């Protein structure tokens, strides 16, 4: 089996490209990215998230662990999806004019239990949304984690 000069050059270039790519990958993996999860407790970013307004995106730091439900935890059972859809549709199409903030709350249903999370503009919005969820899912099946914004 004779290998031509062009084939030898092509193999050498391919090997060099693969080696170079691997080196770049290894060097990139050694860099440490500074995130809030890496920050020591009591650091400025964590304290800022704790004192921020209810709809501040910095508050999403709490969603990075498994302590709170997120939309990714939504149950896949048809009954769970139906409950979430009915609560959301009632919220969006109901007789009350809810704020955009209230319409964007998280509604997560797992095993028939509804968790409501996020900011609302007033105590009246909060009460009304919880009532909707209780009407759809049942009185004992609602976990109210809604927060009234400090300055609507």
Image (cartoon, rainbow, N blue to C red):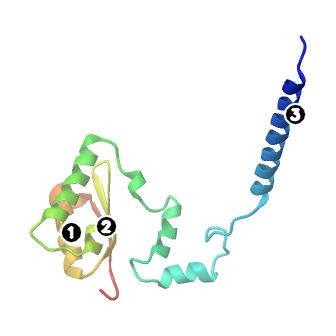
Q: In which quarter of the image is residue 41?
A: bottom right
Relative placement, left or right, of 101 versus 94 is right
Circle 2 crowding by C-alpha within 10 Å: few under 14, some 14–19, many from 20: some
What residue sits right under mark 3 in the picture? Answer: 12
Q: Do the residues labelled 2 and 1 touch (CB within 8 Å)?
A: yes
Write the residue at 14% across / 63% down. 93
Q: Nearer the viewer, residue 48 or 111?
A: 48
Cα–Cα gap, marks 2 and 3: 57 Å
Rendered location of residue 34, percent (x, y): 68, 69
Q: Distance between the residues labelled 1 and 3?
A: 66 Å
User: Which residue is at a point 53% across and 61% down the rendered structure image?
Assistant: 65
Nearer to us of marks 2 and 1 is 2
Q: Are marks 2 and 3 in contact (CB under 8 Å)?
A: no
Q: What element does badge 3 sit on?
A: helix
- Please provide percent x and percent y for residue 141: 25, 57
> Which residue is under mark 2?
105
Q: Is residue 49 left or right of residue 7?
A: left
Q: Which of disc 3 and disc 2 is earlier in sequence? A: 3
């Amino acid at each position: 089996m004779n290998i031509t000069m062009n084939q030898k050059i092509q193999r050498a270039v391919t090997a060099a490209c693969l080696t170079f790519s691997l080196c770049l990958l290894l060097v990139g993996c050694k860099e440490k990215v500074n995130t809030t999860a890496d920050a020591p407790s009591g650091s400025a970013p964590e304290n800022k998230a704790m004192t921020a307004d209810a709809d501040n995106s910095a508050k999403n730091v709490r969603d990075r662990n498994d302590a709170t439900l997120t939309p990714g935890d939504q149950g896949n059972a048809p009954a769970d999806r139906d409950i979430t859809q009915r609560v959301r549709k009632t919220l969006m199409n109901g007789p009350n004019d809810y704020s955009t903030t209230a319409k964007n709350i998280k509604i997560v249903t797992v095993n028939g239990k509804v968790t409501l999370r996020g900011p609302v503009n007033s105590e009246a919005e909060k009460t009304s949304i919880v009532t909707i969820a209780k009407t759809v899912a049942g009185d004992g099946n609602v976990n109210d984690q809604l927060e009234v914004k400090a300055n609507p």
